[in-house]
Image (cartoon, helix red, strand yellow):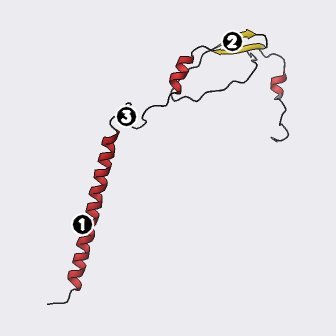
Amino acid sequence: MAEKAKDKPDPGWLQAGIPGLVRVSGTIIVPYVYQDIILKYRIDKSANGLKLTLVNPDELKAARREPADFAGASDGTDNWQWYLWIALATAALLLLGVALYWRQIRQRSARTAPPA
């Protein structure tokens, strides 16, 4: 079905003016933003028809900036503390595992050792 419709306009766009619908020439590109924002446009008349002009480009620029840190503090200074706690917990679990394994080996060798 997509192949049949290739390079053919949508018939709804070819109809005469629909009340409340304003046709604008060109392509509208929706930018990716990291925050909620309301984009405000103004319709201007040009030689080629109507043209959309973004009214609040500074707000859009601020909303497009990626946040510094998704997980914690916004300034990113506390990140090393989280890594330190993770490393400490990993080392404690590793030490506990080695101690339990050594104890099990020692108990097994005490049971199987020949009497002296």
Q: Residues within 10 Å of mark 3 (few under 14, many from 20)?
A: few
- The residue depicted at 43 percent of the width and 32 percent of the height is 68
Can residue 73 be seen in the rendering of this structure? yes
Residue 108 location (% of width, % of height): 25, 79
For mark 2, give the secondary structure. strand
The residue that disc 3 covers is 76
Query: Along the horizontal axis of the image, is 62 left or right of 81?
Result: right
- Pointer 1 local density, CA inside 10 Å: few below 14, some 14–19, many at least 20: few
Three-letter code, disc 3? Gly
* Residue placed most toward the observer, 51 or 22: 51
Q: Mark 2 sits on what residue? A: 43
Whether residue 85 is situated above or below residue 60 in the rendered picture: below
* Horizontal arrangement in the rendering, residue 29 relative to residue 78 (left or right): right
How far apart, in angstroms, are the residues tagged by discs 2 and 1? 73 Å
* Residue 37 appearing in the image: no
The secondary element bearing badge 1 is classed as helix
Residue at 49% over, 31% down: 66
Q: Amino acid at mark 1?
A: Ala
Amino acid type at image mark 2: Ile
Q: Residue 97 versus residue 21: which sits nearer the camera?
A: 97
Q: Position of residue 72 (x, y in %)?
A: 37, 36
Tell me which numbered mark, 2 or 1, is placed earlier along the sequence. Answer: 2
Please give the name of the residue rendered at 61% of the width and 27% of the height, measured from the top-left corner.
31
Mark 1 highlights which residue? 99
Crowd class of label 2 (few under 14; some 14 to 19; many from 20; radius 10 Å): few
| Sequence-first disc among 3 and 2 | 2
Residue at the spot x=78%, y=13% of the render? 49
The mark nearer the N terminus, 3 or 1, is 3
